[in-house]
Amino acid sequence: MKKLLLALTVVSAAIAVPASAGTLEGEVRFGGVANKQTNSTEYRVQYNDALYNGLVQYGLELQTVQPKNEGPVGTLFSGKLGTALPGVFGLSSAAFAEVGQSLNKKVSPTVGGNFEFWGAGVNAAYPLGDALTLKAGYRHRESFNGNRMKEDRLHSGVEWNITEKTAIGATYYRTTGSLRTDEVGVGITHSF
């Protein structure tokens, strides 16, 4: 599995870097917002690109999370592959699958440590004029051995195009399963 992840990473990077035609996203997420307190901070960077007029979409994602803003930082790295779905009344959507690696300090026999995971999801976007876009989506992630990670996440948010190639946004995330969080993310996206 580790060789598959490495191969996926190398192939994606080899295609993405020279082309530089995709999008780069950066986001900071604050957890625990339902309790009106921040109990974790997450940083996420993602590169996305498409081939064949969006028929094939791919991306790489790196996430780091520090629970309760102290102690060891957990890291997730994943590669994504998907496709655009047919648009309906201006609504665009895409489905994706992903594989990834968790690189975490082992806390106990069942908590932490390195493991591989898979995921699948769908994202949708609806433009409100030229500058504003509503976004929503669902993602399921699960470790291959079934007991390290099993989570479902819904998200919705808004993105504002501040230039032709740059947008800023805010997103609300609700995750259930082995990880239960309510997070608010603020981010920036730049297209090349």
Image (spheres, helix red, strand yellow):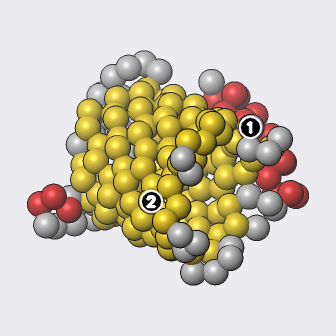
Residue 152, percent from left and from top:
34, 35
Name the residue at 69% across, 28% down: 4
Q: Is residue 162 visible?
A: yes
Mark 1 or mark 2: whose residue is earlier in sequence: 1
Instruction: Give amino acid for label 1.
Output: Val
Residue 54, percent from left and from top:
74, 44
Q: Is residue 65 above or below residue 94?
A: below
| Disc number lying in front (1 or 2) | 2
Q: Is residue 68 left or right of residue 159?
A: left
Q: Residues within 10 Å of mark 2 (few under 14, many from 20)?
A: some
SS for dot 1: strand
Instruction: Give amino acid for label 2.
Output: Leu
User: Residue furthest toward the top?
Assistant: 145
Q: Which mark is residue 158?
A: none
Residue ID for mark 2:
134
Q: In the figure, residue 9 lies in which quadrant?
A: top right
Residue 79, percent from left and from top:
63, 40
Q: Is residue 101 above or below residue 164?
A: above
Residue ID for mark 1:
56
